[in-house]
Amino acid sequence: MNNIKACIFDLDGVVVDTAKYHYLAWRRLSEELGFVFTEEHNERLKGISRMDSLNILLEVGGKSFDEETKLALAQRKNNWYIEYITKMREDETLPGVREFLKYLRENNIKISLGSVSKNSMIILNSIKLIDCFDAIIDGNKITNAKPDPEVFLKAAEALSVKPHECVVFEDAIAGLKAAKIAGMKCIGVGSSEILHEADKVIQNFENLDMSILDF
Ligand code: B16
Ligand code: MG
């Protein structure tokens, strides 16, 4: 038995693999600016806010711009990104996620999204997953990106549960840190070598049962 009452899900890299679309859009921007941005560079952007991502991209390309230009560049990237994510389909939901969300609800576990993405509603709409969440906390509702715990604390508040009653599912180190600072358990989704700060690590959501919430 445990005292877990809620699960909070990161979006990009946990529910869907949007990293490839972020990459396509950032690469398009780098090409316009005249330099190469590789998939390896893109790894550095996972879980990081849009403007922080742009700053890393510009550092890779050795470019600097004033704030106004940077906002316009980020907007340009985002417009391309939105083109891609509006075309996403239900079968792009990562393996086992849809079934696990349904299973949690059947077992009276509350469910929230906890993402820094400002595009989360577009994505959840495309993959038809909005109804699976009791609360949705995303980049439009927070002022501080991960590793600040704000996004997860707001999710707990929205679900009327205490932080120590929550488990966070995360694919990024910044997200694991945020969960820990929030006083929550966290389960890494991906490689245990990279996500060693997590309480547990899973490869995907297939064949999970309630024992995953035992700590
Ligand atoms: P947007 P998450 C994060 O989402 C992504 O991992 C990160 O790569 C992205 O830059 C960030 O959202 C902002 O996204 O530009 O759509 O607002 O992992 O917290 O769900
Ligand atoms: Mg993520």
Image (cartoon, rainbow, N blue to C red):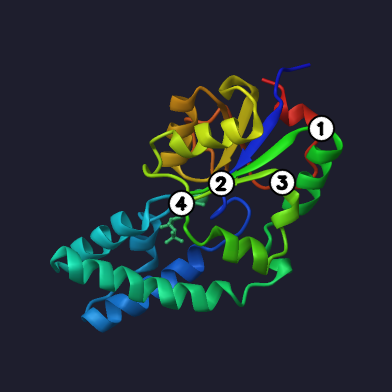
Lower position in the chain sequence, tag 1 or tag 3: 1
Quadrant for residue 6, please give it: top right
Label 2, ligand 2: CB separation under 8 Å: yes
Residue at the spot 77% in from the left edge and 45% down from the top edge = 100
In front of the other: label 3 or label 2? 2
Q: CA distance from mark 3 to mark 2?
A: 13 Å
Report which residue position mark 4 lands on.
Answer: 139
Nearer to the camera, 30 or 143 = 143
Q: Earlier in the sequence, mark 3 or mark 2?
A: 2
Q: Check disc 1 and report the residue beneath it.
A: 108
Hey, what amino acid is under mark 2?
A: Asp
Q: CA distance from mark 1 to mark 3?
A: 18 Å
Residue type at tag 4: Gly
Which of the 4 image quarters holds residue 59? Answer: bottom left
The answer to whether mark 4 and mark 1 are in CB contact below 8 A is: no
Amino acid type at mark 1: Asn
Is 2 positioned to the left or the right of 177 in the image? right
First in sequence, mark 1 or 2: give its number.
2
Left or right: 201 as drawn, with respect to 23: right
Whether 215 is drawn above or below 43: the answer is: above
| Residue sitting at the far right | 106
Nearer the camera: disc 2 or disc 4: 4
- Disc number lying in front (1 or 3): 1
Please name the residue that numbered disc 3 is placed on. 205
Please name which of the two marks, 1 or 2, marks the residue nearer to the observer.
Answer: 1
Ligand 1 is within 8 Å of the C-beta of the residue at disc 4: yes
